[in-house]
Amino acid sequence: MALLEIKNLSKSFGDLEVLRDVNISINKGEVVVIIGPSGSGKSTMLRCLNLLEQPTGGEITYQDEDIMKLGKKVTEYRKHVGMVFQRFNLFTLKTVLENVMYAPMKLNKVHKNEAMNQAMELLKKVGLENKKDVFPSSLSGGQQQRVAIARALAMSPDILLFDEPTSALDPELVGDVLEVMKQLAKEGMTMVVVTHEMGFAKEVADRVIFMDGGYVVEEDTPNNIFTSPRNERTRAFLSRIL
């Protein structure tokens, strides 16, 4: 049974149709990587999964519940489906430790000491326990993104959504973030990753989805997608970037 299922999803901004009849199933423990050219609808689709964008049509079900009918319960849903953004979105006036502690204390009413202990464990996990007392502005982009991952993990989500998590980073900072994501995959975290990092997709993904023009054009194993794609549009895209 799919943990998260997308059926006939569509999204328009005025007359601009960004997503068209998208159908994707995400199973527990899977790493699904979504690739495609800019403007293909990848990030919009991901934002719809967390209801940061309201879909125009279709269904998104989480554990058999239609999340588009949750109304005010959407905050509860987002506790289970975390998101890591391109631009980190850390609280600039809170320390690294406070950033990671905030959501469990605010939303789950976790006691401060428990939240602090959990936050320290997560900062160790991403290799930043020694930065706990500094503010985000003093960190590199790669370090800020690792804090953002720790913050998302602090809610113990069932699924993590990554929206091009390395696209805003200098090339030399990308590796540390990808290593954290690879470790999460090894530990069984269910992940949906929009990325241009094809090496990561080849190494870590269970499935790769190629999107273009708002459609899911092709979906297959990394080996099949990268060595023998069936669709001409997929072949043309990969021939340009690989």
Image (cartoon, rainbow, N blue to C red):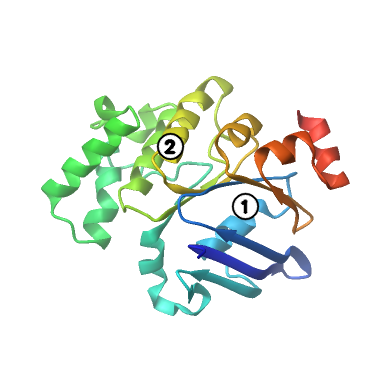
**Mark 1: which amino acid?**
Ser
- Image quadrant where residue 10 sits: bottom right
From what the image shows, is residue 161 above or below residue 125?
below
Question: Which residue in the protein does label 2 denote?
Answer: 186
Closer to the eye: label 1 or 2: 2
What residue is at 53 percent from the left and 42 percent from the top?
Answer: 86
Q: Position of residue 114 (x, y in %)?
A: 14, 48
What residue is at 55 percent from the left and 36 percent from the top?
Answer: 204
Does the residue at mark 1 contact the one at mark 2 (Cβ under 8 Å)?
A: no
- Image quadrant where residue 188 sits: top left
Secondary element at tag 1: helix
**Mark sitting earlier along the chain (1/2):** 1
What residue is at 59 percent from the left and 61 percent from the top?
Answer: 25
**Mark 2: which amino acid?**
Lys
- Image quadrant where residue 75 sits: bottom left
Q: Where is the C terminus found, in terms of image quarters?
A: top right
Q: Nearer the viewer, residue 225 or 46?
A: 225
Classify mark 2: residues with Cα within 10 Å, few (<14), some (14-19) or many (20+).
Answer: few
What residue is at 21 percent from the left and 55 percent from the top?
Answer: 105
Q: Position of residue 110 (x, y in %)?
A: 18, 56
Q: Is residue 141 visible?
A: no
Q: Nearer the viewer, residue 108 or 205?
A: 205
Left or right position of 161 against 207 = left
From what the image shows, is residue 90 above or below residue 135?
below
Left or right position of 165 against 131 = right
Q: Position of residue 132 (x, y in %)?
A: 25, 32
Classify mark 1: residues with Cα within 10 Å, few (<14), some (14-19) or many (20+).
Answer: some
Q: State the separation of the CA atoms marked 1 and 2.
A: 24 Å
Question: Which residue in the protein does label 1 denote?
Answer: 43
Q: Nearer the viewer, residue 113 or 62?
A: 62
Q: Is residue 241 visible?
A: yes
Left or right position of 44 against 176 = right
